[in-house]
């Protein structure tokens, strides 16, 4: 009997995701044992500093990856929007589970929607991507940095530090906080981060036995969409340090035709004064190429200059 160890952060949402993977593995393979290895990452410890200043969301996964490379863990479970585009040698992103709602959620105890916020209201978010798009719509708002796990962010809202905050809908749904969502922001209004709402499983590339065990947990449509979004990000050398958004949708084809993939991408400056957008569609088996096509559209509009300027400001 094999015992698998899942490396996970210890935030409530990360633990929910790890428990979900554990229960699915046991459901499909009742003969194995699965344990959780909880870890506190450097990004979890440095809550007073914006992520863009300390190395980005890659810090959320670095310690988990090191535990796998040392042989202390067999797999790591991640929010896909936190996973860097390039993985350490020896590790592979093997499984994408079924995606939850990828939208952003407007959360407030006073106001029902983003549009209803009064002029000068204080809005909390840790994401330059969200800040960029919200400032484009509402340049009158005061956008302030908000870090911490979902529970911590909700507590800061409840204590009156903010008039409203923006969180991922998926996290609120998974943790049982769906009633806190005042408005699910339409994806056409605020394009999500690449991979938002999807859970991914990272393993050592030489562990074929484990990869075989994980096969039933994969979700075909979610995997294709995330591949396209990450392909666009990779071409742009994207990370959470810069305002990049990507969202793909899959439309089932006819019996004699392949599924069709549509991808929308966005790059902007932190204040929303300049927003670049691109889109492409094609057969689902061309997911990576569609991602590259959208990235090239954005680069042709000047995305590289915007991203270089923001990276220099964050250095």
Image (cartoon, rainbow, N blue to C red):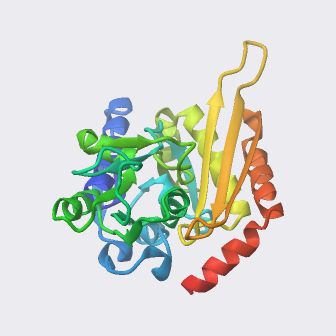
Where, by quadrant of the figure, is residue 267 drawn?
bottom right
Numbered-mark total: 0
Quadrant where the N terminus is found in the figure = top left
| Relative to 307, residue 213 above or below | above
Near-viewer residue (138 or 314): 138
Q: Residue furthest left?
A: 159
Q: For the point 75% across and 35% down, which residue is it?
A: 285
Near-viewer residue (183 or 221): 183
Where, by quadrant of the figure, is residue 302 drawn?
bottom right
**Is any part of residue 306 visible from this angle?**
yes
Q: Tell whether 285 sits left or right of 124.
A: right
Q: Position of residue 250 (x, y in %)?
A: 64, 31
Q: Residue furthest right?
A: 300
Near-viewer residue (135 or 235): 135
Q: For the point 27% across and 52% down, which residue is it?
A: 108
Q: For the point 81% across and 57% down, which residue is it?
A: 296
**Is any part of residue 67 visible from this angle?**
no
Q: Residue furthest front?
A: 119
Q: Position of residue 74 (x, y in %)?
A: 42, 57
Quadrant where the C terminus is found in the figure = bottom right
Q: For the point 47% across and 40% down, which residue is it?
A: 97
Q: Position of residue 119 (x, y in %)?
A: 38, 62
Where, by quadrant of the figure, is residue 255 drawn?
top right
Q: Tell whether 15 sits left or right of 160.
A: right
Q: Position of residue 177 (x, y in %)?
A: 24, 43
Q: Tell whether 171 sits left or right of 206.
A: left
Q: Tell whether 47 sits left or right of 103.
A: left
């Amino acid at each position: 009997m094999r015992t698998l160890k899942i490396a996970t952060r210890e935030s409530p949402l990360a633990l929910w995701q790890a428990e979900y993977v554990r229960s699915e593995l046991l459901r499909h393979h009742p003969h194995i044992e699965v344990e959780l290895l909880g870890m506190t990452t450097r990004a979890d410890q440095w809550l007073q500093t914006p992520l863009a200043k300390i190395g980005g969301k890659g810090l959320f996964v670095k310690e988990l990856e090191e535990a796998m490379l040392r042989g202390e863990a067999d797999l790591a479970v991640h929010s896909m929007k936190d996973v860097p585009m390039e993985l350490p040698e020896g590790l592979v992103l093997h499984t994408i589970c079924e995606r939850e709602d990828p939208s952003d959620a407007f959360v407030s105890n006073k106001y029902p929607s983003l549009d209803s916020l009064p002029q000068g209201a204080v809005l909390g978010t840790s994401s330059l991507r969200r800040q960029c798009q919200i400032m484009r719509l509402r340049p009158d708002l005061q956008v302030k940095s908000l870090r911490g796990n979902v529970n911590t962010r909700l507590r800061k809202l409840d204590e009156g530090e903010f008039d409203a905050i923006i969180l991922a809908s998926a996290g609120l749904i998974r943790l049982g906080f769906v009633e806190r969502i005042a408005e699910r922001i339409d994806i056409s209004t605020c394009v999500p981060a690449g991979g938002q709402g999807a859970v991914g499983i990272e393993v050592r590339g030489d562990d074929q036995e484990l990869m075989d065990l994980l096969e039933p947990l994969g979700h075909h449509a979610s995997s294709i969409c995330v591949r396209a979004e990450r392909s666009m990000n990779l071409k742009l050398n994207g990370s959470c340090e810069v305002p990049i958004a990507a969202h793909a949708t899959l439309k089932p084809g006819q019996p004699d035709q392949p599924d069709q993939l549509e991808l929308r991408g966005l790059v902007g400056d932190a204040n929303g004064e300049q927003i670049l957008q691109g889109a492409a569609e094609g057969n689902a088996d061309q997911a990576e190429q569609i991602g590259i096509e959208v990235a090239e559209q954005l680069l042709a509009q000047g995305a590289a200059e915007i991203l270089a300027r923001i990276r220099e400001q964050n250095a």
